[in-house]
Image (cartoon, rainbow, N blue to C red):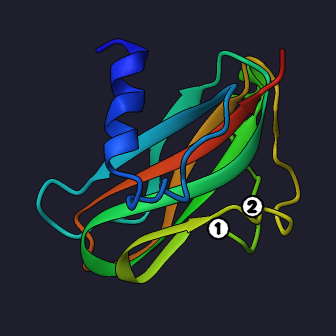
Amino acid sequence: MPKRDVQMIRDFAPERPEPVTAAPPGSSALTVIIDGAGVEITTGAKADVVVPFTATITAWAMLADQSGSIAVNVLRSVYAGFAPTVSMCTGAEPAIVTATMAESHDLSAWPSVSIVKGDVLRFYVDSCTDITRCSVALTLARTF
């Protein structure tokens, strides 16, 4: 669909607000799906991702398949130092609390929001109740 068509659609639906989680230009979303295969998600390391560019984390968003609670720690290391053990968000982990979604644009409590090209991020479930599938999305402002 050409860009012009997208603009025309927006013009016909001005009452629909932009989502709060919309990423600014030059941003990317790094999304990890944590799937308990039909049962409550267990604690522990769930995914390791190599980030192919330098960036700053500016927000996070989480969606769950059903109401419940989950806290996911984001750990970081340089590629040569794999496996990650240092939390980027100590005490302020992305979390859903008795709901199906949550997000935050305030990462001021995170000790670090900087990622260098080649860093490895590990998504580690600290706790979970009732949720069997969850996505965790980090909004990354790329540094060029």
Residue 123: x %, y % from top left: 53, 49
Q: Are marks 2 and 1 in contact (CB under 8 Å)?
A: yes
Above-or-below relation of 133 to 70:
above
Label 2's element? loop
Closer-to-camera residue (136/7): 7
**What residue sits 36% from the left and 61% below the top?**
63
**Callout 1 amino acid:** Glu
Disc 1 designates what residue? 93
Above-or-below relation of 110 to 137:
below
Residue 46: x %, y % from top left: 42, 47
Label 1's element? loop
The quarter of the displayed image where residue 94 is located? bottom right
**What residue sits 54% from the left and 53% below the top?**
21
Tell me, yes or no, if residue 83 can be seen here: no
Above-or-below relation of 125 to 143:
below
Residue 142: x %, y % from top left: 75, 25
The quarter of the displayed image where residue 131 is located? bottom left
Distance from Cα at disc 2 to Cα at disc 1: 5 Å
